[in-house]
Image (cartoon, helix red, strand yellow):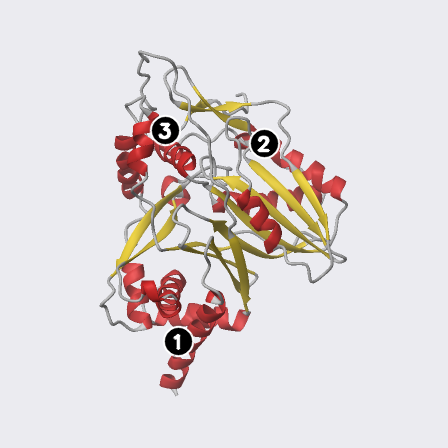
Amino acid sequence: MKRQQNRTLGAFEKTFWLLDQIDSKDFVLAGEIDGLKPAEEWRKAIDQVQRRHPNLSVKITIDEFSRPVFEHVDDLPIPLRVVHAEDNYSWEQEAEKELALRFDTAKGPLLRAVLVQKPHSTVLILAGNHAVADGTSISYLFRDIIKAVSGQELQMMDPQPSNDDTLGLPEDIAIPNTGQVQSLPNVFKKVSPKISSKRIDEGTSQGILERARLEKTTVHGALCAAALIVSRRMRADLNDRKIELISPICSRRPLKLDDNYGLNITTHAVYFEGEQELSFWEIARLAKAGLEGTDTEEHVKNYINFFRGIVFGSSDLHNMIEILKGPFNQELMVTNLGRVKFDTDFGDLKLKAIYGPMVRSGKGMEQTIGAISSNGSLCLTNTSDNPIPGMLDEMEALLAEACELEQVAAN
């Protein structure tokens, strides 16, 4: 079988591609690595990983039926930018540059890398486009790239089918065009997203996990509660209004997928009324309850079918874009990748922490909290065009306070 990706986009891939015409759907993750390797070796490692994952060598074109398609391109190297810096250099500014730089999906590739080389450590920043991948996909790329730069050989992977195909659903139908194939303007506003990060110590991270279990909720529920309460406290316009909080959910487990580089998520909203007076843990339990049943194959199929009804069966791309301007206008998003699912010790190199996903959406006032746990510590980011200053510090303090209240009650 040829390891090249050439197919029409699935419904949610197409949705993200259309949303990208409205406003950037690029995203970033950053990995802090103890240890150093020459930039030339990182270059070779990224090339090896690109050969492993077919979706890293594609562009998105429009076929004669006005359907977006993944098209394999030979000799399409992933851009690698190298920054030499001191120990106190903030990698967040490089991540901000990457989020402000749009991908040209019609040319590809749909991944970029930045290598920040400090005297004794490395930060690897990976930026991707959501039409082709998700945060979990990039988290696996850190593993693959560090394996490759450490001298390990990587097995090649077959092209990932769309989620539609995995679920037994047909591809988008080919509707003959009465006129020319549609073109899209690709005129985008300039953006300047701001990123902050925080690594919560192991003790506090473990305390959050244990208390969340005691309260019959999850770490994700606790993060949602902290984000909601802090947002209302620190931004007056959010005080008494209904807030939409979005949570992306990984669909790899219900669809029995491997760690291929691809888009395998659904997204779900939980709403919180302005007049509600609830405790921290009541909010956390509501956040958990609002997501129940979203990690099943049946739910993923219903979700995909919803978007098939919007973006399939028509060649009118402009009408689809107009329809999609309504959803995905949340005030808050908590995108939590959970625990890193692989060994982080690679010999000379150790993956100390991963941060992200860092992503922005079109309203400009939303706060996007990224979360991922690695080596026992919960790592958080906040990404926004108009960030709430000190939001992560306040979230950490509130989370610690909630855990301490349990300790006091137990004594």
Q: Is residue 123 left or right of residue 251?
A: right
Q: Nearer the viewer, mark 1 or mark 2?
A: 1
Three-letter code, disc 3: Asp
Quick one: SS at disc 2? loop
Q: Position of residue 89 (x, y in %)?
A: 68, 59
- Where residue 141 sits: x, y (%)? 57, 43
Q: For residue 285, which numbered disc appears in the image?
A: none
Which three-letter amino acid code belongs to the residue tagged 1? Ala
- Do residues under tags 2 and 3 come within 8 Å of each other at their CB atoms? no
Front position among marks 1 and 3: 1
Q: Which residue is farthest bottom?
A: 411
The residue lying toward the viewer, choosing from 371 and 184, is 184
Measured Cα–Cα span from mark 1 to mark 3: 44 Å
Residue 353 or residue 383, whichever sits in front: 383
* Left or right for 191, reference 92: left
Judged from the image, the secondary structure of the residue bearing numbered disc 1 is helix
Residue beneath disc 3: 165
Q: Is residue 304 visible?
A: no
Reading the image, the residue beneath label 1 is: 402
Describe residue 339's horizontal placement relative to residue 11 as left or right: right
Task: Check contact, mark 1 vs mark 3: CB within 8 A.
Answer: no
- Residue 156 image label: 2
Q: Residue at the location (49% across, 67% down)? A: 390
Residue at (50, 72) in percent of width and height: 204
Counting residues from the N terminus, which is met first, the one under dot 2 or under dot 3? Answer: 2
Q: In terms of depth relative to the viewer, which is nearer, 128 or 262?
A: 128
Residue 145 placement, left or right of 310: right
